[in-house]
Amino acid sequence: MPNDIKVIESEYDVVVVGGGTAGPMAAIKARERNPGVRVLLIDKAHVKRSGAISMGMDGLNNAVVPGYATPEQYTKEITIANDGIVNQATVYAYAKHSFATIEQLDRWGVKFEKDANGDYAMRKVHHMGTYVLPMPEGHDVKKVLYRQLKRARVEITNRIVATRLLTAADGSVNGVMGFDSRTAEFHVIRAKAVVLACGAAGRLGLPASGYLMGTYENPTNAGDGYAMAYHAGAELANLECYQINPLIKDYNGPACAYVTGPLGGYTANNRGERFIECDYWSGQMMLEFYQELQSGNGPVFLKLDHLAEETIQTIETILHGNERPSRGQFHAGRGTDYRHRMVEMHISEIGFCSGHSASGVYVNERAETTVPGLYSAGDMAAVPHNYMLGAFVYGWFAGVNAAERAAAIDFAPIDAEQVEREKARIFAPLLREHGLPPLQVEYKLRRFVNDYLQPPKVTRKYEIALERFAEIREDLQQLKAADAHELMRCAEVAAILDCAEMAARASLFRTESRWGLYHLRVDHPERNDAEWFCHAHLKKGADGRMSHLKRPVEPYIVPIAEQEKDAYDRLRLNPTTAARAVATA
Amino acid sequence: MAFQPRSIAQYSEAAVTVDLDKCIAHKGCTVCIDVCPMDILDIDPATGKAYMKRDECWYCLPCQKDCPTGAIQVAIPYLLR
């Protein structure tokens, strides 16, 4: 055991892990709720530029704005888009609080597009309703949040890699452990409530480019939050409903049909023809995309070359200035000018992300997980299709409820054995003379994820994956880190492996196909509502292994009519409709 | 002598390059190093200026956008270019 590791102990009422989108909102709202509550926000990077929106965002994908949509309509749309498997209470709570959150962000200085009357300039992208609100100047979101964090006097510690939660004798969460990725100091932080806002599990699959950090998600979002929640005993919901996104090939950023769609751009096949009615990301949309990609009409492109010069200039300004600003440089290098050439697209590596699909840590409409004292929000919390605005809304809920818990209870004593065990686990790679480099272990692990887990899912391949993952688990005992930075990569490989195993086991448990490509099991090709119209939860069992539970879908708040249920199954255009759509585009 | 374990260093072209004339890291500036989500930039002890230390760039651009003197240039990593 490393005795020369410096241990730093501290104590806060509320600790928020992750300073991207949901985390800052949680920290600010906890302080607003009760200024007597001490709040610490920790981040693996620097809060100024961390998380999925480090460079900003170009729009709200799911704004429920009065006059354009109602919370009931939105809840219905997401229920149908997610094949009925949603806890409507969480989606409805989001939808009802959506507009108040937009107004809050607006007051703080986030700029949304407005029309001449000062009303929000809403756009339609979804299959049924109108929910997209552009933010052409959305590159300042992080600056706005940072100013509010300072104003609320939230304490911030950057470059802390959180690795495990501490649990009290009653099973509740009473702290966070982690280390500084520059100094390798070990942090033990006592808390009355912890909010996990660690983003998606974005380093699960390997991008087709083979470049380890060329992921769709910000690669800091490695799945640490999913692993921490699992080891603390929390239930994770519907992990088999993977995130798979349609992206710009090789660049691996979003092609952004949400931005270009309302301006006349669309997803097309190699003949420049539309093949789907609606570019909103759903499992069924991804299945149509995948089939077109594999067919003689493939690959798939974003088509903009028919648009007017001023429209293209608008698109360039938005897309090359906000979410992924190096995009223009990528296109220039490949000689892709939107005016003359379609943008080649591909499908992403797999990941977990409830922001885009439905795979996350279970939370109720108060952002509470199944473990007392543990809250979660943002991409890692299972509120389906939640996107950035959902992260803000659930961050808000988590902050308020965590502050209330913290004011009502005392600190629970820390279990010294948990601390010693984690210290030994985390710092072992620093002590080895020789060993495996963490990035090489990660590469091999993520290549196996691609080889065996990328849908379409085959049972036998998934079983082989579990054998390979068990071998990688042995390899973790051979990891070697030369410094604190490499120690961070070692900690991440362990989290990625936990996520990979959860992905495999969750997928094997649900013996049906659902959510289009996300859970397409070739040897169980049919949807089986009789047995599987339910949530599938995964948690750490009493024996320390992964266990599974079926949870009934909660009674609907907003009923879905029989003829509406399959609206998202009818995304493929028939040839006549396709011809008409091209003609009128 | 028994078999001795060895490691091999692999090299990569750095996607992030620094204009040493413009960089003011030697005067105490650490903006690019602070804002990098992946924490891949550091100060080169030989020059006192910022440099890309690790091949883990997400080509996200905070370093380039936030640099007060325009000393940072981020290229798309070769494997994706």
Image (cartoon, coloured by chain):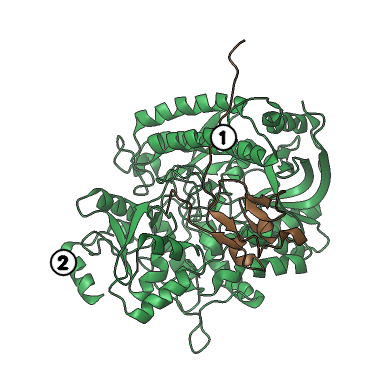
Q: What element carries label 1?
A: loop
**Which tint is chain B?**
brown
Q: Quadrant of the N terminus of chain A?
A: top right
Q: In this view, does A467 lie above or below A21?
A: above
Residue A64 drawn at (x, y percent): 50, 71
- Going by the numbered disc 2, the residue's amino acid type is Thr
Q: Which residue: 33% across, 74% down?
A: A264
Residue A442 drawn at (x, y percent): 53, 36
Q: Is residue A468 visible?
A: yes
Q: Is mark 2 on a helix, strand or loop?
A: helix
Tag 1, which chain?
A: B
Query: How far is disc 1 from disc 2 in space, using C-alphas?
Result: 58 Å
Q: Which residue: 42% across, 62% down?
A: A76
Q: Say left or right for A530 vs A378.
A: left
Which residue is at the front of the view, A257 or A574? A257
Q: In this view, does A319 lie above or below A350?
A: below
Of labels 1 and 2, the one closer to you = 1
**Which tint is chain A?**
green
Tag 2, which chain?
A: A
Q: Which residue: 69% across, 28% down?
A: A428
Residue A280 drawn at (x, y percent): 38, 62
Which residue is at the front of the view, A325 or A446? A325
> Residue A310: which quarter of the image?
bottom left
**Going by the picture, which residue comes out furthest to the left?**
A576
Residue A89 drawn at (x, y percent): 53, 57
Residue under disc 1 on the same chain as residue under disc 2 = no
Q: In which quarter of the image is the C terminus of chain A?
A: bottom left
Residue matched to label 2: A576
Residue matched to label 1: B9
